[in-house]
Amino acid sequence: MEPIITSTLCVGGIGLASAAALAVAEKYLSVKEDPRINKVTEMLPGANCGGCGYAGCADYARKIVNDNVDLTLCAPGGSECAAAIAAFLGRAAGAVEKRVAIVLCCGDDTEAVRRAAYNGITDCAAAQATAGGDKGCTYGCLGYGSCARVCPVDAIAIVNGLAKVDKTRCIACGKCVDVCPRKLIKLVPAAAEIHVLCSSKDKGPAVKKVCGTGCIGCRICTKFADDGAIVMDGFLAVVDYTKRLTNEEVVAKCPGHCIRSDGAGNKETAAAS
């Protein structure tokens, strides 16, 4: 019996010593967290989308309190959230411009040519890695839904082979922007109503061979755009979103039919899929 009692006493002693050591460590070595961090975390929307550049809402709240980082980085929370946190912390909030994601392509399967039959993984990066993708336009949306799968609020649907964003759901987290292998998705001001839904930099004749709704580089839109709100990037017309574009003539005059008003062709809700 003695070996059993001795072993029991030894194990018990080690346990008591360890508990005492942990208690001492808790008292003298633990780092006290600022209680304001939990409060700020509760004030954030809880999307944990990572759009602010941090691991999640709790991490962003910690940086706000401990490092005084910018209060306007939370796109889902917007100005109201930033103002509330600013008031709580006694800081200046600053303005938050609401943004939404937009897919700069309107070449769905009725307009754009598919040059091959892709039978691989249903993933845009995988399709792009397979001989540059199956779409005739090497700039166009591949339509395999990588952006839709990473969207935390189901704001993206694949409709007729083309990714489309529901602007009413989009929280501008930027996940879709990062995942698109062709970099077709961009965060733009939510107030913007006119967009060039094309990303092809090829010359007009080459564009027409592969898509019925592509920019042909005619420059007509630049003549009607307000205050230089549309500029040319080679053969591609590009909206300068720092300027207000309101003249609907740029839509009516576009021979490529790729300039759309109020996100036309890009507003369908995720339910459409």
Image (cartoon, grey):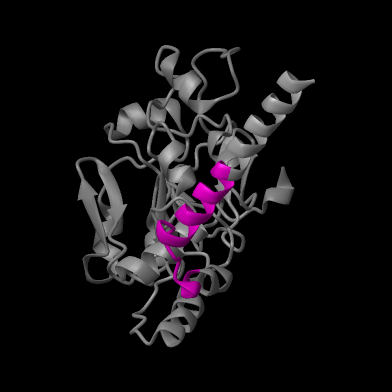
Quadrant of the image for the C terminus? top right
Most foreground residue, 44 or 216 = 44
Extreme residue toward the front, this view: 2
Most foreground residue, 266 or 88 = 88
Q: Is 203 drawn above or below residue 84 in the view shown?
A: above
* Magenta region includes residue 143: no
In the picture, measured across the screen, residue 217 lies left or right of residue 117, that is: left
Total marks shown come to 0
Q: Residue at x 59, y 56 (%)?
A: 267
The percent coordinates of residue 198 (x first, y second) are: 39, 43
Most foreground residue, 225 or 127 = 127
Q: Residue at x 23, y 71 (%)?
A: 227
Q: Residue at x 39, y 74 (%)?
A: 96
The percent coordinates of residue 23 (x first, y second) are: 53, 55
In this rendering, does residue 172 appear at all? Answer: no
Q: Is 213 drawn above or below residue 268 in the view shown?
A: above
The percent coordinates of residue 156 (x first, y second) are: 60, 47
In this rendering, does residue 262 appear at all? Answer: yes
In the picture, measured across the screen, residue 55 lies left or right of residue 264, that is: left
Q: What's drawn in magenta, residue-wise? A: 17-37
Quadrant of the image for the N terminus? top right
User: Could you tell me what secondary structure mostly forms the magenta stretch?
Assistant: helix
Most foreground residue, 38 or 25 = 25
* Magenta region includes residue 24: yes
State the image quarter where residue 39 is shown: bottom right
Q: Is 222 drawn above or below residue 111 in the view shown?
A: below
Q: Is 109 drawn above or below residue 23 in the view shown?
A: above
In the picture, measured across the screen, residue 35 lies left or right of residue 234, that is: right
The percent coordinates of residue 219 (x first, y second) are: 25, 51
